[in-house]
């Protein structure tokens, strides 16, 4: 328990990309390339975060801005650290920054079969808004499109003292 308190969430830097990419490769059958991470990190206004314990990256989150909508493009916690609240801390910090910047909606795509991630997103108020058929070219799997309600209107704003484990139900 004490160890968990030492986890820090901060902006991703170029020097983190080696560790970030290692986790990515261990996680997904079709991982992003390191240069793709570098390109996304270089985008103006993007929010890219890492969770770090000591010098070690144990999770990360990537996003891309489209006006007042933000697309959450990637969130991963290293396998051995899952279910310990790290993903929630990344998401909590991300949502807090989005609200501060006047973002209205956060959207994302998730594999239809990735029920774990869907459960995680629902915990943060994401709801299903559509399906992209055959979106994932490696498996032909459908993508579920999920979105928050309007962050500037919903009670989200007042609940953004977000707890480590999502919103209270
Ligand atoms: C999704 C992911 C980032 C969540 O990170 P995490 O640190 O494990 O999540 P947390 O410990 O903060 O979990 C918060 C809540 O989300 C839900 N949740 C998380 N993992 C879950 C799982 N495997 N099954 C069901 N619910 C889950 C639970 O409600 C959990 O609260 P609880 O532990 O009190 O029940 C992590 O599972 C991951 O890296 N998955 C692989 C990569 C991936 O699929 N990313 C999403 C791509 S779209």
Image (cartoon, helix red, strand yellow):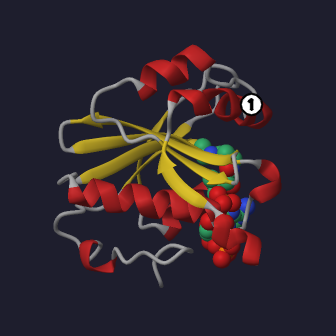
Residue 127 seen from this side = no
Pointer 1: residues within 10 angstroms few (<14), some, or many (20+)? Answer: some
Task: Looking at the picture, tell me which residue is in the foreground, 126 or 10.
Answer: 10
Task: Looking at the picture, tell me which residue is in the foreground, 133 or 86.
Answer: 86
Quarter where residue 6 is shown: bottom right
Query: Vertically, is 15 above or below 102?
Result: above
Q: Is residue 95 left or right of 137 when viewed as pictured? A: left
Task: Looking at the picture, tell me which residue is in the foreground, 127 or 54.
Answer: 54
Residue 86 seen from this side = yes
Q: Residue furthest front?
A: 54
Give coordinates of residue 131: x percent, y percent. 46, 41
Q: In which quadrant of this rendering is ligand 1 seen?
A: bottom right
Give coordinates of residue 61: x percent, y percent. 52, 44
Task: Looking at the picture, tell me which residue is in the foreground, 116 or 41.
Answer: 41
Quarter where residue 112 is shown: top right
Q: What residue is disc 1 on? A: 22
Query: Vertically, is 165 above or below 55?
Result: below
Q: Which residue shows up at 70% across the image and 25% down it? A: 139
Q: Which residue shows up at 22% across the image and 51% down it? A: 103
Q: Quadrant of the N terminus?
A: bottom right
Quarter where residue 21 is shown: top right
């Amino acid at each position: 328990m004490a160890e968990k308190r030492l986890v820090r969430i901060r902006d991703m830097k170029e020097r983190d990309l080696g560790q970030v990419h290692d986790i990515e490769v261990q996680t997904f059958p079709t991982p992003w390339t390191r240069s793709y991470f570098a390109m996304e990190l270089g985008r103006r206004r993007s929010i890219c975060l890492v969770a770090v314990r000591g010098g070690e990256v144990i999770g990360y989150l990537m996003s891309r801005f489209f006006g007042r909508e933000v697309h959450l493009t990637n969130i991963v916690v290293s396998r051995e650290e899952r279910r310990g609240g790290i993903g929630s801390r990344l998401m909590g910090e991300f949502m807090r920054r989005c609200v501060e910047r006047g973002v209205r909606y956060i959207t994302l795509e998730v594999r239809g079969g990735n029920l774990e991630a869907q459960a995680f997103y629902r915990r943060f108020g994401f709801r299903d808004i559509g399906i992209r058929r055959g979106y994932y070219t490696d498996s032909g799997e459908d993508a579920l499109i999920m979105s928050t309600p309007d962050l500037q209107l919903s009670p989200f704003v007042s609940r953004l003292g977000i707890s480590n484990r999502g919103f209270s139900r």
